[in-house]
Amino acid sequence: MRRSAVAALAAVLLLPLSACANDAATSAHGAAAPAGRQVDGPKVKIMVGGLDKVIYLPAMLTQRLGYFADAGVNVELLTEPAGVNATTALLAGDVQGAVGFYDHTIDLQAKGKHVESVVQFAQAPGEVELVSTKQADAIKSGAEFKGRKLGVTSIGSSTDFLTKYLAVKNGASVSDFSPIAVGAGQTFVAALQQGSIDAGMTTDPTVANVLDKGLGKVLYDMRTPEGSRQALGGLYPSSSLYMSTEWVEKNKDTTQKLANAFVKTLKWMSTHSPEEIAAQMPADYAQGGPAQYAAAIKSTLPMFTTDGVMPADGPRTVLAVLAAFHPDVQGKEGTIDLSRTYTTEFVGKATG
């Protein structure tokens, strides 16, 4: 009863800030250590906001490479279709860690809760604003969002407020367009195909699928640091392993093991080709075929860090974006202590 009540409360607290990523989550409920690998170490459950999303690729890749086992930690990966659900599970105590967007840590501090990014996977959102091919000549920037139907993962999601930010930055108002919740993956593709949306924000491998079918064109590409700076005014750290600050303080040895494993993976990714990375992942993640999946990974790779360290100016960019629209953050910028939303203690000591 108590856990159900906590979970319900967490869901209410997190409603304004939903998932940042868009692709459909894998149908599997989770993933344990690779077959034949018996790990004699602490057990940790990590909830991922969609195990098959390229932006969260380091989670499953670390498991598949056996790096959790090498680090001496027994990790069970669980999956939910949205980052907000991962955070809800973390707050409820159902898991010890979550893989999702860093911006949740700022949102939660505004609500009086302390969660911190322990390993920063990415320095850019990995999101792409796609315009329907039929509307590509009419929508050249956020200024032309007026009167349009724009697809987002869900209302109140990070794709929602990033879309609003792009509109306002380019002279439009958040009331000038209609955000349409179209979900992710195939539902996003269908919405474009049927004309239910004029444009929308999503991630790989959905981006690769849309472009391959000729259904849309790229308007804003935030899969790279350069794209993030152009669209948002700076680096926007996104995918990360974040955990309760209290849990981290009480379990520093286990946290270090997790950091070791993830940093090792990030370094491995930086020295291997998209095809080699794709080959390590579950076959059913490549729904558009191996070549398309490898291309999706190639397009998204620039967003990832190589060492798990938070980019110096990134948190300020995230705070500025959230403060522009998020009701729980707006007006509280002066009270948010960004230094408490992440730590470099463990990645700085990582032996990966």
Image (cartoon, helix red, strand yellow):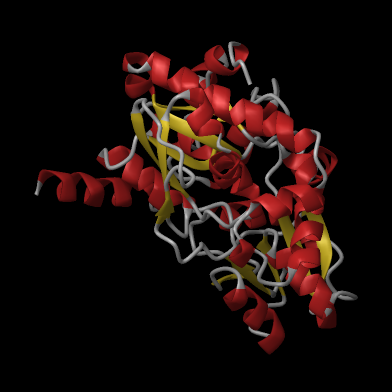
Which x, y percent locates residue 194?
67, 88
Q: Residue furthest bottom?
A: 194
Q: Is the residue 267 above or below the residue 209 in the image? A: above
> What residue sits 44% from the left and 21% below the top?
255
In-front residue for pair 299/126? 299
> What residue sits 61% from the left and 12% below the top?
348
Q: Is residue 12 left or right of residue 234?
A: left
Q: Is residue 327 left or right of residue 308?
A: left
Question: Residue 211: which quarter of the image?
Answer: bottom right
Question: Residue 52: which quarter of the image?
Answer: bottom right
Image mark count: 0
Question: Residue 190: which quarter of the image?
Answer: bottom right
Q: Residue furthest right?
A: 137
Q: Quadrant of the C terminus?
A: top right
> What residue sits 30% from the left and 51% below the top?
12
Q: Is residue 118 visible?
A: no
Q: Is the residue 182 above or below the residue 153 in the image? A: below
Which x, y percent locates residue 260?
56, 22
Q: Is residue 143 left or right of residue 81?
A: right
